[in-house]
Image (spheres, grey):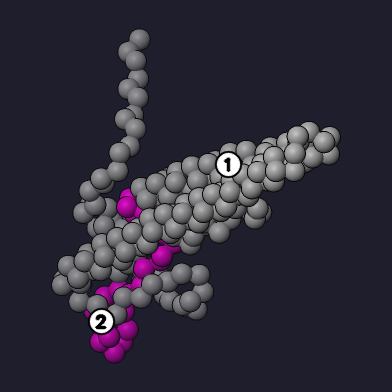
């Protein structure tokens, strides 16, 4: 059985949950003005990391994907332990001449092989389900962002809006950063469809 069964299920779209409690950004600095480039070309950029940790859609889907990943890991761990116990039991009986016949030993060995095959198929299915869920998340994020920018840019009239992540843009003046504007606008439009636990009301003393 492969080690780190759930390891390949880690996907780039799942962000650290510890970052999901960041407060919504404030518009402390204004986006670039119409002639800020000096040549009439209007350019702006959006910080991807901030978008993924502060956009409510991303935060919702992060919780869903994390829950599915944890459930899959727990299921595979349980099934893997059952398989290991069966293998240990078989080896112990084999060493102690616990089988009444060769056919009995071969039958149990075949059952263990089927159990191992079932586990591998389960692993592949769970990985595929998580990958599909992640694709749904990525497509939804892209669609919501593109639809919002189409409306947003009717007034702003930027010629180009770039994504900034890590060092893919070596330098950009802060005045070109419209991340807060985009996140605030997206969150105002977003209507969550995820079931969230109701907040407990404090009991009156």
Residue in view at x 43 percent, y 76 percent: 172
Q: Nearer the viewer, residue 2 or 106?
A: 106
Q: Position of residue 159 (x, y in %)?
A: 25, 81
Q: Position of residue 177 (x, y in %)?
A: 36, 69
> Which residue reaches farthest bottom?
39
In the image, taking residue 79 as reference, residue 13 lies left or right, namely: left
> What residue is disc 2 on?
159
Name the quadrant containing residue 104.
Answer: top right
Residue 106 can be seen, yes or no: yes
Residue in view at x 17 percent, y 67 percent: 151
> What residue is disc 1 on?
79
Total marks placed? 2
Q: Nearer the viewer, residue 145 or 50?
A: 145
The CA span between labels 1 and 2 is 54 Å
Name the quadrant containing residue 173.
Answer: bottom left
Q: Position of residue 2 (x, y in %)?
A: 65, 55
Residue in view at x 75 percent, y 43 percent: 102
Marks 1,2: beta carbons within 8 A = no
Secondary structure category for the residue under label 2:
loop
In the image, taking residue 61 as reference, residue 66 lies left or right, namely: right
Q: Residues within 10 Å of mark 2 (few under 14, many from 20)?
A: few
Which segment is the magenta one?
Answer: 32-58
- Say if 165 sits above or below 205 in the image: below
Disc nearer the start of the sequence (1/2): 1
Q: Quadrant of the C terminus?
A: top left
Secondary structure category for the residue under label 1:
helix
Q: Nearer the viewer, residue 98 or 148?
A: 98
Residue in view at x 26 percent, y 75 percent: 33
Q: Is residue 169 magenta?
A: no
In the image, taking residue 64 as reference, residue 184 lies left or right, namely: left
Mark on residue 27?
none
């Amino acid at each position: 059985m492969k080690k780190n069964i759930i390891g390949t299920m880690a996907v780039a779209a799942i962000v650290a949950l510890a970052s999901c409690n960041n407060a919504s950004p404030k518009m402390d600095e204004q986006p670039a003005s119409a002639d800020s480039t000096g040549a009439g070309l209007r350019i702006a950029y959006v910080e991807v990391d901030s978008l993924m940790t502060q956009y409510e859609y991303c935060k919702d889907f992060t919780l869903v994907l994390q829950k599915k990943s944890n459930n899959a890991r727990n299921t595979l761990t349980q099934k893997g332990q059952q398989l290991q116990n069966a293998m240990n039991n078989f080896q112990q009986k084999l060493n102690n001449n616990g089988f009444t016949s060769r056919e009995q030993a071969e039958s149990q060995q075949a059952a263990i092989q089927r159990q191992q095959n079932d586990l591998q198929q389960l692993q592949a299915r769970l990985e595929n389900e998580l990958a599909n869920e992640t694709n749904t998340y990525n497509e939804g994020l892209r669609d919501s962002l593109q639809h919002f920018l189409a409306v947003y840019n009717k007034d702003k009239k930027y010629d180009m809006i770039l994504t900034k992540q890590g060092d893919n843009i070596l330098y950009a003046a802060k005045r070109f950063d419209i991340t807060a504007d985009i996140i605030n606008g997206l969150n105002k439009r977003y209507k969550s469809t995820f079931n969230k636990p109701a907040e407990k009301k404090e009991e009156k003393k």
